[in-house]
Image (cartoon, rainbow, N blue to C red):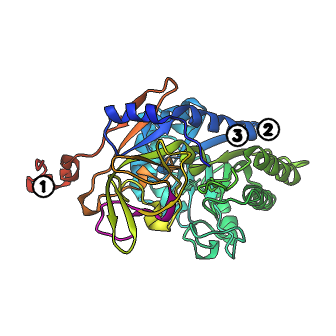
Amino acid sequence: MKNLPFSKDTLMRITDAFPTPFHLYDEEALRARVRALRQAFQWNEGYREYYAVKACPNPVILSILRDEGCGLDCSSYTELMLADAINVRDEGIMFSSNDTPAEEYRYARRLGAYINLDDVTHIDFLAANGGIPETVCCRFNPGGDWSLSNAIMDDPKDAKYGFTRAQLSDGFKRLQALGAKHFGLHAFLVSNAMDPDYYPALAKLLFDTARALHEETGADIAFVNLSGGVGIPYLPDAPEADIAAIGKGVEKAYHAAFDGTALHPSLFTELGRYVTGPIGYLVTRVMHEKRIYKHFIGVDACAADLMRPAMYGAYHHITVMGKENAPCDHVYDVTGALCENNDKFAIDRRLPQIDMGDLLVIHDTGAHGHSMGYNYNGKLRSAELLLQKDGNARMIRRAETPADYFATLDILGLDKLR
Ligand SMILES: *Cc1c(COP(=O)(O)O)cnc(C)c1O
């Protein structure tokens, strides 16, 4: 059973003011999640969460996170612009990009961001495009198989990210020769990890590697960045990650690696899904019911609003509003309108009887939800709303209009199509 932070009456009030579909984000739950995360790592004096902007790049959400003490993990020009626009700069930004254009490095350097280099060849590229900062981070790819891996990311040896271990040694020395004084070490190996040992195991790997690099090169290790990847329970009976226990597991690895050494690096994370995934809901209305060889429910949202089911076959729980306690004695495919047969939010899902006009709430859409949206079939992406403490919703991004879709045809004079 997955609970909702709003009643059917509240939701009906919201849908009177804002047409479906929309993503609805729960501000109070967001603040509570960040606070619990920071609490889990408060044993580390320099701890900071750099929220992965790509998971939910809305400036209102990002401002809430900023006010809760988070920095921002950016990986593109426009994500840097978003950080800049809400006055997050300097050590508030972690620029964790890959295959990086020169202009993006220059912009990140102008903003004073931490630079997290994805490849050994990027050292000289950065030196030529913005310059090497005093503190710089390198992304590690340990290769081989990572036993906790799942389908979202490849095994490290197949993944495109990071330096090999040997390249880290060479890279640190090259960076020192170019003036770098302090170093960070980063790795991101698994997305949506449900194993509570993922972070502690990754931490041990990074801590041991950081220590060895220090012994080998004399480099000061300023921080270790555990990146993202802590999972959330999309399935109703899956356990919630115990972030306090994960924090303790990382603390133990920290002491084992650094006690008695001169190193006391700050600990950073770049969680996206963990922070905002569960606080977002895609609200959609039932438009059609179709019976052929299967029983279909057609809703007014589609994969353009939430791509994860179509892309990964991901499970997203669905609540039929007002029927929370009704028996799940029907089996439906819940579909959107794309001319693309994988545009299904649920396949063979047991749900209560659905009637035309019912509101469906699709859970856990606050990360990699709206932000992964696209315009296939000329579909327009939905609005984003913030559910505030007082129970009122505030629009924090309007829905796209045809004018948005046609905006890039201005060169043909067709952008005024409406
Ligand atoms: C996507 C990403 C994250 C966030 O991943 P989650 O699975 O949402 O926690 C963090 N760091 C980097 C470099 C990423 O690419």
Q: Nearer the viewer, residue 193 or 123?
A: 193
Where residue 237 appears, as percent x and y from the top left, is: 66, 55
Query: Residue at 48% across / 45% down in the picture?
Result: 281
> Please, what is the three-letter code of the amino acid marked with disc 3?
Tyr
Query: Residue at 58% across / 35% down in the picture?
Result: 29
Q: Nearer the viewer, residue 316 or 66?
A: 316
Mark 1 residue crowding within 10 angstroms, few (<14) / some (14–19) / many (20+) = few
Where residue 8 appears, as percent x and y from the top left, is: 46, 36
List the residue tagged with mark 3.
Answer: 47
Is 331 on the left or on the right of 238, as rendered?
left
> Please, what is the three-letter code of the amino acid marked with disc 1?
Ile
Mark 3 residue crowding within 10 angstroms, few (<14) / some (14–19) / many (20+) = many
Looking at the rendering, the quadrant in which ligand 1 lies is bottom right
Q: Residue furthest right?
A: 260
Q: Nearer the viewer, residue 58 or 21?
A: 21
Is 231 on the left or on the right of 109, as rendered?
right
List the residue tagged with mark 1.
Answer: 411
Is 189 on the left or on the right of 409, as rendered?
right
Among the two numbered marks 2 and 1 on one chain, the one whose residue lies closer to the N terminus: 2
Query: Residue at 67% across / 73% down in the picture?
Result: 143
Kindly indicate whether the residue at mark 2 contacts the one at mark 3 (C-beta within 8 angstroms): yes
> Please, what is the three-letter code of the amino acid marked with disc 2?
Trp
Where residue 305 appears, as percent x and y from the top left, is: 38, 53
Q: Which span of residues is magenta-colored?
A: 334-351
Where residue 298 appears, as percent x and y from the top left, is: 34, 58
